[in-house]
Amino acid sequence: DARVTQTPRHKVTEMGQEVTMRCQPILGHNTVFWYRQTMMQGLELLAYFRNRAPLDDSGMPKDRFSAEMPDATLATLKIQPSEPRDSAVYFCASGFGGVETQYFGPGTRLLVL
Amino acid sequence: DAKTTQPTSMDCAEGRAANLPCNHSTISGNEYVYWYRQIHSQGPQYIIHGLKNNETNEMASLIITEDRKSSTLILPHATLRDTAVYYCIVRVANTGNQFYFGTGTSLTVIP
């Protein structure tokens, strides 16, 4: 049963620290999405990649957030420095081709103190 | 992509059909209707999608009106595990572009 995996599942850190979240898309999927979910804003798209190339990162605060795909099996989302307002659940999703179906990972629950 | 309007919340008795409405009056001819759901503390899950014909799969049925300005997701026999937030999304198919998740409908299945 192929699944998207995300690590870590939970992260508590202090303001100013660097946070790195990792995602392993389903093997063979060529599109990867990063979302952030908070109670106030709901589910927001931060960035997405196709064939490892960034297609849209307009939803991401550029000064502190960065997203990369070092290879087809790994996507990373980094926050440096982290701030309390970054506290949220970060989801990764993957799909293939026209991406009619996105498969979501379990999320990383981030708390910045 | 066209905007959708859904009720904020709904209740449904266990074992009964849950009918979740969605309005998408500005939908374009090449836009599909997609439904996802998010069970508490999990990532969203794909349910079904369609263009203009009614669709059915093992999870649900999708009924789209003839003018395509609205649709209804039907869970034929709701169970407690169907308690979730249901998102109706309109999007051009096969573009590989992102889905815009709104606020959805919070469905509570009552024992």
Image (spheres, rainbow, N blue to C red):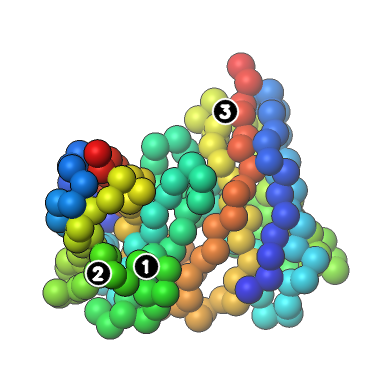
Question: Contact (CB < 8 A) between labels 2 and 1?
Answer: yes
Please name the residue that numbered disc 1 is placed on.
A60
Subunit of mark 1?
A
Residue drawn at x 56%, y 76% is B93
Q: Nearer the viewer, residue B52 or B12?
A: B12
Image depth: mark 3 or mark 1 in front = 1
Say which of B61 and A108 sits in front: A108
Say which of A103 and B105 sits in front. B105
SS class of the residue under badge 1? loop
- Please report the residue visible at 60 percent of the width from the left and 71 percent of the height from the top: B91
Q: Are marks 2 and 3 in contact (CB under 8 Å)?
A: no
Amino acid at the residue labelled 3: Thr
State how far apart marks 3 and 1 are (Cα): 38 Å
Query: Is there one chain holding both mark 2 and mark 3?
Result: no
x, y percent for residue B11: 69, 29
> What x and y, as percent, mark residue A41?
51, 51
Q: Amino acid at mark 2?
A: Ser
Query: Callout 2: residue from which chain?
Result: A
A112 to A75, vertically: above or below? above
Q: Position of residue B42 (x, y in %)?
A: 39, 41
- Quarter of the figure that contains the C terminus of chain B: top right
Question: Which residue lies under the disc numbered 3?
Answer: B79
Which numbered tag is attached to residue A66? Answer: 2
The reply to whether residue B4 is in sight is yes
Left or right: residue A105 versus residue A18 is right
Image-quadrant location for residue A29: bottom left
Instruction: Determine crowd level at label 1: few under 14, some 14-19, many 20+ residues with C-alpha closer than 10 A.
Output: some
